[in-house]
Image (tube, rainbow, N blue to C red):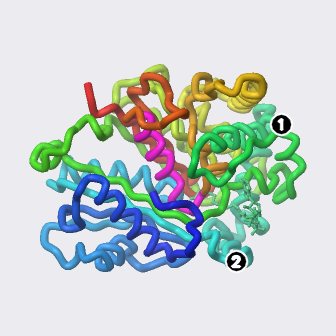
Amino acid sequence: MTALNPAQSLSPSSLMQRALYAALDSLGLKVKDLNGLIAVPSLAESHFMEAHYLGTQVGLLPGKSVIVRTVDTGGAGPVTGLLEARRMVENEGVDLVAVVAGDAVKGLSSQEFLKRADQSCSHPAAELPSPVIPNGYDRIARFQMSKYGVTRDQLASCSALMSIMASRHPFALTKKPRTIADILAATSVAPVTSVLECARRADGGAAILVASSQFLAKRGLPRDTGVVIIGGGEASGPLYPPKEIDTISEEMFSCEEAAGVAYEEAQLGVRDIDFFGLYDCFPICLIRAVEAVGLAEKGLGGVFIEEKYREIAARAAVDPEFRPQDIFPVNTHGGLLAFGAPWEVPAMYNIIEAFHQLTNSAGKRQVKDARRALVYGNGGIFSASAVAILGKGKY
Ligand code: MLC
């Protein structure tokens, strides 16, 4: 990954290129070693056929026997890309695929960002005021409050908990833990959403390489320095929620279905997973995610998060050595709410943090004996869910 909000402002294409070169360099590989490229589009500088644009910029194209694809499932894009890369390796004879994302939404003025972001999920039928996306998630939060008794403090706990996690990651944007009171006192953006409960707008790029076992053997690359993809699932919902809260139904949500498909393919259950990288663009996304992957019972995700937050905050206050990951092995980097969220890029950080956990390179954030991880990306307003289950490369 590139630095978040680099000192010198860079275009989305430059961020994508830097991330791609950094990933290749880390293994001593070159662009011409790739025969697959997947990119997700940016908001700040969108291109027709983003992956072809990037492939041409870096000199992968023209080239023979190269498969290049743009995937657009919004914020789920990196996880969809990871699963698509696996299909390319398994079914299409591709050896080495790069999945790349980059955006520079912090570099846009507030007005320009909102103009573009509002267009992405708006429709007259949804009657969502600007900012459209925070208001869309806020509507779902209010649905969850009326249907399942989620409280305002439970919502705020999500952001407070993510700020504790982020404060332990050297690259995260949020450096200091925040309390529920801090979150509630921040500027209001929508009826039950403050500015500190929005995906933290940022610039950044990230890339991931997916290789076949044959490629690793041929190039003398050890299998146990990477991770393996052992299951995946995707499911879809509508682009925007219905206007009336009382007409929202469980049918519009898709994470549980995607996670179910992934667990089934991997022949694993929630108790087999040691680390979870869960999408948290707004608190309600994290609350629904802990339920969907089976960490909390249906309707009790908010209670679960608030309990974890209060326990972690209390123990961290008296014990500087306390390890929050021992009781909440989720988003040890701080998620979208606190690590940073360059539009469609941030699910990459869930995958990268899972990679660090599974390769025992997460430093003081390390989850003990992490052997399997689940990563979840969400696009639109609960419009796309992609879940992948990853395993340690070494058995
Ligand atoms: C913002 N700030 C935060 C923060 N969010 N600080 C800590 N934690 C957070 N989570 C800070 C900023 O760094 C900034 O401080 C100040 O608050 C104001 O933020 P801003 O973004 O510069 O302000 P503004 O332009 O007025 O816009 C506010 C906003 C916007 C809430 C309308 O930030 C917004 O729309 N955010 C949500 C972005 C979004 O929708 N992403 C996609 C999520 S949906 P400073 O010091 O820097 O000035 C998704 C699915 C998908 O992920 O498919 O994409």
* Magenta span: 341-358
Residue annotated with mark 1: 153
Is any atom of residue 291 visible in this view? Answer: yes
Residue sitting at the far top: 271
Picture layout, residue 169 above or below residue 315: below
Q: Nearer the viewer, residue 218 or 139?
A: 218
Q: Of tags 2 and 1, which is closer to the observer? A: 2
Placement of the N terminus among the 4 image quadrants: bottom left
Relative to 168, residue 96 above or below: below
Q: In the image, what residue type sits under mark 2?
A: Ser
Q: Residues within 10 Å of mark 2 (few under 14, many from 20)?
A: few
Q: Is 348 part of what is drawn in magenta? A: yes
Tell me the number on the disc at residue 109: 2
Residue at the location (39% across, 58% down)?
A: 207
Name the residue located 77 percent from the left edge and 52 percent from the top edge: 196
Left or right: 206, with 119 as reference point: left
> Looking at the image, which residue is at 19% across and 47% down?
212
- The image quadrant where one finds ligand 1 is bottom right
Please name the predominant secondary structure of the magenta segment in the image.
helix
